[in-house]
Image (tube, rainbow, N blue to C red):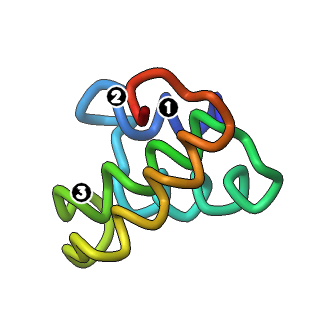
Amino acid sequence: YEAAMILKHGSEDVANEDEAFRMFQKAAEQNHSGALYNVAWCLQTGEGAAKDPEGAIVWYRKAAENKHGPSM
């Protein structure tokens, strides 16, 4: 999760949204609430993934079920 955050928000020479999305997915599979939220965000915005608003809702709900504040 932390490595994905660096890839997502890092400087231009470090940033890699596609790889960040893949890493968020791996952390989300382990039920990490922040990763669940970030998978949803990527699907909503198209950052690192194809835009999928309906899929984003599914992931936001999973994050909310894990008490992730912004997802609620």
- Mark 1, secondary structure of its residue: helix
Amino acid type of the residue tagged 2 in the rendering? His
- Mark 2, secondary structure of its residue: helix
Q: Write the residue at 48% across / 59% down.
A: 59
Q: Write the residue at 47% across / 43% down.
A: 37
- Say which quarter of the image contains residue 66: top right
Foreground of the two, 57 or 14: 57
- Does residue 3 appear left or right of residue 7 in this picture? right
Where the C terminus falls, by quadrant? top left
Proximity of marks 2 and 1: CB atoms separated by less than 8 Å: yes
- Say which quarter of the image contains residue 34: top right
- Does residue 46 appear left or right of residue 18 in this picture? left
Whether residue 2 is situated above or below residue 24 in the rendered picture: above
The disc label shown at residue 47, or none: 3
User: Gap in Å between the C-alphas at discs 2 and 1?
Assistant: 6 Å
Tell me where residue 70 appears, x and y as whole percent.
Answer: 38, 25
Proximity of marks 2 and 3: CB atoms separated by less than 8 Å: no
Where the N terminus falls, by quadrant? top right
Whether residue 68 is situated above or below residue 43 in the rendered picture: above
Amino acid type of the residue tagged 3 in the rendering? Glu
The disc label shown at residue 9, or none: 2
Tell me where residue 10 appears, x and y as whole percent.
Answer: 36, 27
- Does residue 14 appear left or right of residue 69 in this picture? left
- Mark 3, secondary structure of its residue: loop
Residue at label 1?
Answer: 5
**Mark 1 or mark 3: whose residue is earlier in sequence:** 1
